[in-house]
Image (cartoon, rainbow, N blue to C red):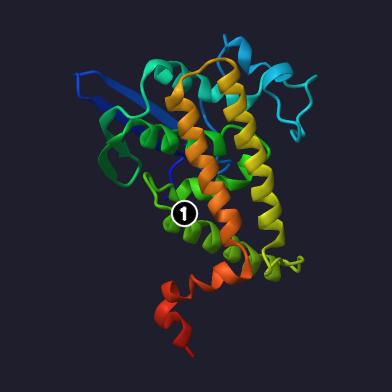
């Protein structure tokens, strides 16, 4: 039986004894955050300020950027935490847990990534299918394989539904170009409101992942992934 919600716990244990827990609950079907938006969001999350130039949301219907509001609690806590500070970061979900002793920005980047995808942002929200298989502290190659595998699986189902397919990954390239613009906007806005380096560096790390995915979608780069499919090529 499938769960009603996907539950993620991010626990930061700092060297000086401080601890902080972030609980993320996501509706299993819609893959949107269950937690409603804050009633008192920071002013910088206002659509008039934080809105991306490519955002399709109407400012009349959305006073605040949903992505900014849902990130605000994380941003406010880590505002004064140096990005290079070390911590033991535990991540638990419905099935298992993992941990890593690493810089704070690595954990914040992972935490931000799952919040952004499920925040209601119509652009980064296209990555919601990856949320069910969220992999904390994922490497660039792991992220690349997850994205491509999920997208190619989607094309398989589009065949069944008699829809146009995108085996050349053109639409995926277009999506990541848009995601890069959103990430750059976030970094710019956080710099303008003088949010310190942990939050900005965490988003920059996500942006770097998006850049890597975009670059890896060329036909030449995709050929480099051939080694990963191994014996699957020989199944007849």
Q: Residue 158's quadrant in the figure?
A: bottom right
Rendered residue at 62%/17% (across/down): 45
Res. 27 in view: no
Q: Residue 67's quadrant in the figure?
A: top right
Taking the image as shown, residue 65 lies to the left or right of residue 140, namely right
How busy is the neighbourhood of tag 1: few (under 14 within 10 Å), some, or many (20 plus)?
some
Camera-side residue: 136 or 164? 136
Q: Residue 141's quadrant in the figure?
A: bottom left
Q: Residue 8: horizontal and vertical position, in percent?
A: 38, 36
- Residue lying at the far bottom of the rendered structure: 236
Q: Residue 76: horizontal and vertical position, in percent?
A: 46, 16
Q: Secondary structure beneath disc 1?
A: helix
Rendered residue at 41%/17% (across/down): 77
Taking the image as shown, residue 88 lies to the left or right of residue 192, namely left
Rendered residue at 47%/83% (across/down): 233
Q: Residue 145: horizontal and vertical position, in percent?
A: 48, 61
Camera-side residue: 209 or 43? 209
Q: Is residue 217 above or below residue 98?
A: below
How many marks overall? 1
Rendered residue at 55%/41% (across/down): 207
Res. 22 in view: yes
To which residue does mark 1 refer?
Answer: 143
Q: Is residue 226 above or below residue 51?
A: below
Taking the image as shown, residue 7 lies to the left or right of residue 186, namely left
Q: Residue 222: horizontal and vertical position, in percent?
A: 56, 69
């Amino acid at each position: 039986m499938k769960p009603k919600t996907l539950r993620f716990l991010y626990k930061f244990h700092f060297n000086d004894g401080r601890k902080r827990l972030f609980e993320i609950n996501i509706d299993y079907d819609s893959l949107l955050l269950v937690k409603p938006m804050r009633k008192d969001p920071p002013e910088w999350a206002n659509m008039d300020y934080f809105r991306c130039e490519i955002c399709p949301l109407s400012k009349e219907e959305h006073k605040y950027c949903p992505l900014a509001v849902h990130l605000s609690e994380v941003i406010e806590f880590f505002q004064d935490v140096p990005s290079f500070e070390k911590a033991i970061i535990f991540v638990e979900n419905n099935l298992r847990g993992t941990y890593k002793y690493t810089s704070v920005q690595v954990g914040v980047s992972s935490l931000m990534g799952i919040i952004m995808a499920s925040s209601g942002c119509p652009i980064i929200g296209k990555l919601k299918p990856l949320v069910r298989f969220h992999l904390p502290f994922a490497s660039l190659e792991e992220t690349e394989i997850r994205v491509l595998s999920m997208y190619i699986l989607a094309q398989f189902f589009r065949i069944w539904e008699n829809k146009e397919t995108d085996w050349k990954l053109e639409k995926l390239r277009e999506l990541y170009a848009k995601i890069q613009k959103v990430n750059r906007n976030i970094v710019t806005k956080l710099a303008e409101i003088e949010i310190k380096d942990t939050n900005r560096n965490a988003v920059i790390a996500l942006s770097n992942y998006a850049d890597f995915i975009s670059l890896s979608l060329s036909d030449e780069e995709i050929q480099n992934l051939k080694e990963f499919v191994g014996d699957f090529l020989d199944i007849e």
